Image: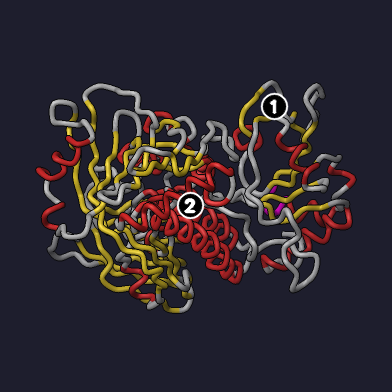
Amino acid sequence: MYDTHAEPGGDSEVLVVGYGPVGQTLSVLLAQRGHRVTVVERWPKAYAMPRAVNFDSESARILAAAGLAEQIPSFSEPSGAYEWLNAEGRTLLRIEATEEGRCGWPDSTAMYQPGLEAALAARGAQLPRLTVLRGLEGVALDVTGDRVRLTVRPTEGGDGERVLTASWIVGCDGANSFVRGVMGVGQTDQGFSHDWLICDVAPHERRVYEPNNLQVCDPARPRTHVSAGPGHRRWEFMRVPGETVEELNTEERAWELLAEQGITPDDAVMERHALYTFNARCTDEWRTGRMLLAGDAAHLMPPFAAQGMCSGFRDAANLAWKLDLVLSGRASEAVLDSYTVERRQHVQHAIGMSVNLGKVICQDDPVAAAERDAVMLAARERGVGTAQPKGAVQPLKDGLLYRRSAGRAPRRPAGDLMPQGRVERDGLTGLFDEVVGLGFVLLTADDPAGLLGDEDRAFLDGLGARVVRVVPVGTQAGPGEVVDTDGVYLTYLAESRTRAVLVRPDFYVYGPAADRAELASVLGQLREGLGVLAAV
């Protein structure tokens, strides 16, 4: 089966293997930048059942950048706080979530994955340079010179092998990645493995659950209950000692466990039940020449921090702008070396956090669980330590970031995820990305004319960068200016003790500048990092 926007076969700039949410997002981000993208997806039709159920503020910003800002409310809703109870119902941990997170979207959003995938597919269908080939699987992959050759055949059997070619290939093809197998790269296993029964349910009537998202750390049977998007709920039950996979993974057993939570066939429809083994693994190298990995093909983590799919979205956002610059001749291929460096450090932190949370909930020894409860309850009472974990995403510490001199750590706030607030220009008020646009952004509190020389201005123009001055509320915004409606940007610059920041297309700060001389240094170092020695 072919779902195409162009003649199937032929040559592309990028081949993407796998059309789940990560492959969809990467394909859209590249195609809307004007690149020819061909996707190979082994399944003839989109999978109609939910898997992931949550994304964070940064992920929502990435989805909005892929053209889904108006569609997000149709398949999702703010999920609210995430509470962890012990067997007696006492709160061990409460992870708060606001509806205006760092990126202007909710900290935590519950979503129905089939709705997300349908919205991404509809967005992809609007892009004439994106071709989606369904019902095909890769059987051979080789690289010769500057070309990648992927041999594919129908997944459901039959003749019809064909060869697809491109400059680059990205494996977004899941935990059993074909592309990763060809690359021959290793994975580091964190030694975490637990079986859980997942039950996705559609209640007949809408109910208010308090708390809306719940982990019950009961050693007799650890369990989870969370929102799975509008009109959907999810329950998860861990397999306990003495219980076999076969005993747990039946519809009858699923309903028995749900009945203990007050859910019966009279109350809801079971959309699916499935047994998953939660693992924690990270691929050692995400790039081998012209072959790259993203999403579950590169990393797996337990769901307890809700960062698996979110990490894949970050992969897509990071890789898309770098491939864009390489394909358009504005950066050398060496810039892609920073992909593994940057994404692996983020993912390793997210995996570590997920595993640590998993060790809390997956404890099935009553004595150890009692000791855990005592420690966490005491910490919660004091308001310190394990009572509130660090965020799942930390600033970048290495990669394509500005440093004052070679060998030194990045100059803070380089590596920060740039916050997003509302701004106003020409009578239009909205989130910064909507009002200003996407790509590189030089954000300044001063007149840019006093900061930029002609060569630096030409370099930024070649990158398609937007130079934006933020002015306080009560000021009339002139050309190239926006009013800082929420006060996010002027506050950020003041707290960072800088006058300007250069923000990358994936919303991470490349580097700050306190004055014209430092801005020249920032831009000069970026030229060098991109392999560009003069204005483009």
Q: Earlier in the sequence, mark 2 or mark 1?
A: 2
Along the line of sight, which residue is nearer the eye, 248 or 452? 248
Q: Dividing the picture into quarters, in which one does residue 400 lie?
A: bottom right
Front-lying residue, 86 or 438: 86
Of the residues shown, which amino acid type is indicated by label 1? Answer: Glu
Q: Position of residue 287 (x, y in %)?
A: 48, 71
Residue 430 in the figure: left or right of residue 149? right
Residue 464 forms part of the magenta stretch? yes
Q: Which residue is mark 2?
A: 375
Instruction: Give the structural element (helix, strand or loop) at label 2.
Output: helix
Tell me, yes or no, if residue 105 can be seen here: yes
Q: Which residues are magenta?
A: 461-465
Q: Looking at the rendering, which quadrant does residue 17 occupy?
A: bottom left
Image coordinates for residue 193, horizontal then vertical, percent: 31, 63
Name the main secondary structure of what is drawn in magenta: helix
> Which residue is more in the foreground, 252 or 154?
252
The residue at which mark 1 appears reads as: 424
